[in-house]
Image: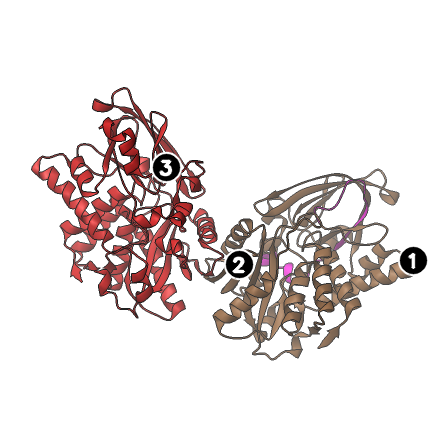
């Protein structure tokens, strides 16, 4: 177990946003949430998987909804904590730890906040190793960890328990419908799982990886090094493109933010074109019209000069950006993983080719 | 507590369908299911309100969704029953209680049949009372809500095996929105068991005898038909109501919208009503009517469309162009005429910016001379 201070938390949130591939919620919302808790004197603890009792029950609380432009989201309150406690109440057992469903500026902050508010450790792991738009784009789904019973709380004050569900897709549909009629934001707590089972399936050390990514960016800025290069190296990634945002169209569709970003190359990419399509998260990219990188591998858009992540749909026309890619965790690169979270899941008739084969 | 025989059950469903004001669910599948259940030897029991012990728990099973035409019923009544049963058991487990009896969510052809089907399978009675005193489209239109009593915890079950417990809701409007959102991903129909209540508070908040009253209307229609007298007059006398219009349907459009069946009926007058027109707008149930473009009757009062030959109810999407119909109306239970009752279930709730006028006042102001 390791206690996290303000600087570590900031590095984690920025790193999570970079690994959030455009989604995972708003970084500034996440920063505000965590700042408020630091000011209240709450303490944050990161726990290694082996630090916890094998019988400990772990919950996965998060906020579910569409990301919207910075500041456009209404106050969502402590709905994730409310869902977390509703599930404890339903199970008549207290959680002993918290696991983040995914990495994202707001997503991971939500799990961190629930952990701090309850004085519990956040596990140094998550169920995606990145951010992902659908509930079933989760290692829990691929490994068959049941999503139910799950609890949902809305900002209006509604609390429900999904006791049983046909499958994770159906759970996704249900939660999404509830989010749509709840100002596009609900708190969810799902996958209540004992530690002994959890440590077999989740992706370990992802929070420390995010922290490292955030830290090297910060240090590079301090030393006036290239922050995008530092981030790329820290995540064993690839610099995919450098360009100017020339077009960006998006809309909110069934609770998802769906859009397309077009870039015109600058510097060593001059004369080239790059396109990214996203559904909350960046899903697929094309280099001069040819498929470049696809999910489950990571596509992140950073501000070229600062290495700061740009969440969708804030990638405004005229911005100078670096696009970087990282390989997905091995857990995703199984046939089941590709079925759940490959390009075809999003309607793109493209075979998944690992980023290192395309770019290595 | 008494056992209902086949004729009583048929009279009950017939009467409930009439008071269902076009909605309340299609009575035909439920009636067929009851007849099949009787053949299998199932027993249907009716308990008087005072027979519910103070410490016993009761709840109401219902199907949320649209009302569908005879030929377009996308699913079997049995699916409704199995969803309601699953939700019923879920709520019992959640509360750690067994329900002593079930009560219909409203007076409607399907609502009563659903409560009967669940109750007989659980070996419990239905109670001679319902949550509304008529049929209504939405969760928040209950006498319990008028009295600020919660609908939760409530359980929802789908044909796909999903089971959801709404532990608490901000208010019934939110409960309604959530149930409707779930219905929309379950073929516009979903089984719900709500309003779990202890006998002592249940009995204080509800009108006794609404099922007996519906059954009496059903009996009156049957007897009129067999004795060759006018069944519509029998309905009007039994419901202490009014003849509102008589004519031929000239237009009948409807659609399924966000889990509701929404439509419009236009009727051209015949007989005493020659050269007059009548129009009814419905959201599952008949909500508002116009006589020659002047507002006539609105919710919470009842607007019933009947077959002039048989006196049977015509449920909404089954009311088609070319049909001869009679429209009757009657006053709503007085709880719905209270300020809070009207706020929840007056014409303004449905977007009609007009004040509610009691049906009997409208009649005195000229409606009666039309008869």
Q: Secondary structure at mark 1?
A: loop
What letter labels the chain drawn in brown? Answer: A
- Label 1, on which residue? A224
What letter labels the chain drawn in red? Answer: B
Q: Position of residue A204 (x, y in %)?
A: 68, 69
- Label 2, on which residue? A157
Kindly check if marks 2 and 1 are in contact, taking CB atoms under 8 A apart as contact. Answer: no
* Magenta residues (range): A312-337
Q: Quadrant of residue A250?
A: top right
Q: Are marks 2 and 3 on the same chain?
A: no
Look at 30% across and 70% down and name the residue there.
B55
State which chain disc 2 sits on: A
State which chain disc 1 sits on: A
- Residue B241, can we see it? yes
Kindly check if marks 2 and 3 are in contact, taking CB atoms under 8 A apart as contact. Answer: no
Look at 18% across and 57% down and name the residue there.
B40
Q: Secondary structure at mark 2?
A: loop
Residue at the extreme left of the image, as rendered: B227
- A327 on left or right of B306: right
- Between residue A168 and residue A43, name the one nearer to us: A43
- Label 3, on which residue? B282
Exactly how many numbered labels are in the figure? 3
Q: CA distance from mark 2 to mark 3?
A: 31 Å
Q: Position of residue B334 (x, y in %)?
A: 31, 48
- Residue A143, can we see it? no
Which mark lies nearer to you, 3 or 1?
Answer: 3
Q: Position of residue A70 (x, y in %)?
A: 71, 50
């Amino acid at each position: 177990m390791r206690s996290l201070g303000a600087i570590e938390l900031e590095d984690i949130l920025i790193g999570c946003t970079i690994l959030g591939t455009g989604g995972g919620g708003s970084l500034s919302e996440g920063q505000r949430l965590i700042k408020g808790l630091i000011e209240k004197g709450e303490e944050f603890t990161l726990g290694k998987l082996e630090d916890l009792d094998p019988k400990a029950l772990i919950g996965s609380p998060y906020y579910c909804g569409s990301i919207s432009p910075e500041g456009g989201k209404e106050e969502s309150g402590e709905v994730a904590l409310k869902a977390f406690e509703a599930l404890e109440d339903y199970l008549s057992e207290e959680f002993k730890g918290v696991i983040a469903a995914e990495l994202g500026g707001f997503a991971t902050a939500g799990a961190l906040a629930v952990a701090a508010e309850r004085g519990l450790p956040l596990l140094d792991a998550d169920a995606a190793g990145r951010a992902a738009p659908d509930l079933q784009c989760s290692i829990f789904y691929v490994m068959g960890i049941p999503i139910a019973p799950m609890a949902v709380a809305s900002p209006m004050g509604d609390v429900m328990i999904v006791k049983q569900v046909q499958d994770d897709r159906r759970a996704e549909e249900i939660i999404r419908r509830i989010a749509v009629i709840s100002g596009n934001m609900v708190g969810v707590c799902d996958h209540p799982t004992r530690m002994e089972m959890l440590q077999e399936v989740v992706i370990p050390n992802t929070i420390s990886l995010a922290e490292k990514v955030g830290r090297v960016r910060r240090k590079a800025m301090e030393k006036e090094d290239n922050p995008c290069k530092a981030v790329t190296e820290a995540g064993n990634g690839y610099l995919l493109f450098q360009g100017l945002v020339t077009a960006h169209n998006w809309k909110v569709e069934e609770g998802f933010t769906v859009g397309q970003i077009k870039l015109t190359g600058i510097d060593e990419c001059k004369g080239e074109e790059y396109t990214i399509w996203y559904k909350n998260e960046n899903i697929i990219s094309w280099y001069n019209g040819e498929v470049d990188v696809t999910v489950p591998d990571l596509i992140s858009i950073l501000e070229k000069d600062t290495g700061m992540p740009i969440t969708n749909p804030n990638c405004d026309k005229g911005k100078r950006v670096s696009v970087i890619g990282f390989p997905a965790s091995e857990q995703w690169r199984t046939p089941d993983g590709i079925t759940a979270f490959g390009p075809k899941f999003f309607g793109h008739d493209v075979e998944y080719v690992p980023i290192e084969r395309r770019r290595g | 507590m008494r056992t209902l025989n086949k004729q009583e059950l048929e009279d009950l469903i017939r009467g409930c369908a009439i008071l269902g004001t076009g909605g309340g669910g299609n009575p035909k599948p439920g009636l067929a299911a009851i007849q099949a259940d009787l053949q299998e030897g199932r027993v249907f029991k009716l308990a008087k309100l005072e027979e519910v012990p103070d410490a016993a728990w009761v709840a109401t099973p219902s199907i949320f969704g649209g009302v569908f035409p005879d030929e377009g019923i996308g699913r079997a009544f049995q699916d409704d029953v199995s969803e309601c049963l699953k939700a019923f058991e879920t709520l019992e487990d959640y509360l750690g209680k067994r329900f002593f009896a079930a009560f219909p969510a409203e007076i409607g052809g399907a609502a009563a049949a659903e409560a009967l089907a669940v109750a007989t399978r659980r070996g419990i009675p239905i109670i001679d009372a319902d949550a509304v005193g008529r049929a209504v489209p939405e969760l928040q239109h209950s006498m319990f809500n008028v009295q600020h009593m919660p609908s939760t915890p409530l359980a929802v079950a789908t044909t796909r095996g999903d089971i959801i417990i709404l532990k608490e809701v901000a208010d019934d409007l939110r409960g309604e929105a959530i149930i409707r959102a779930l219905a929309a991903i379950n073929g516009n129909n979903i089984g719900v068991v709500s309003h779990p209540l202890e006998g002592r508070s249940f009995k204080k908040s509800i009108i006794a005898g609404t099922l007996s009253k519906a059954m009496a209307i059903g009996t009156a229609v049957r007897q009129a038909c067999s004795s060759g007298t006018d069944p519509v007059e029998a309905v009007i006398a039994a419901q202490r109501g009014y003849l509102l219009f008589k004519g031929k349907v000239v237009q009948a459009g409807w659609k399924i919208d966000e889990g509701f069946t929404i439509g419009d009926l236009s009727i051209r007058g015949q007989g005493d009503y020659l050269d007059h027109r009548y129009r009814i707008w419905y959201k599952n149930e008949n909500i508002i009517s116009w006589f020659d473009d002047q507002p006539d009757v609105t919710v919470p009062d009842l607007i019933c469309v009947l077959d002039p030959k048989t006196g049977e109810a015509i449920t909404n999407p089954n009311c088609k162009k070319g049909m001869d119909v009679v429209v009757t109306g009657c006053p709503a239970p007085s709880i719905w005429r209270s300020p809070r009752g009207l706020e929840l279930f007056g014409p303004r709730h449905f977007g009609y910016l007009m004040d509610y006028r009691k049906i009997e006042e409208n009649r005195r102001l000229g409606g009666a001379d039309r008869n």
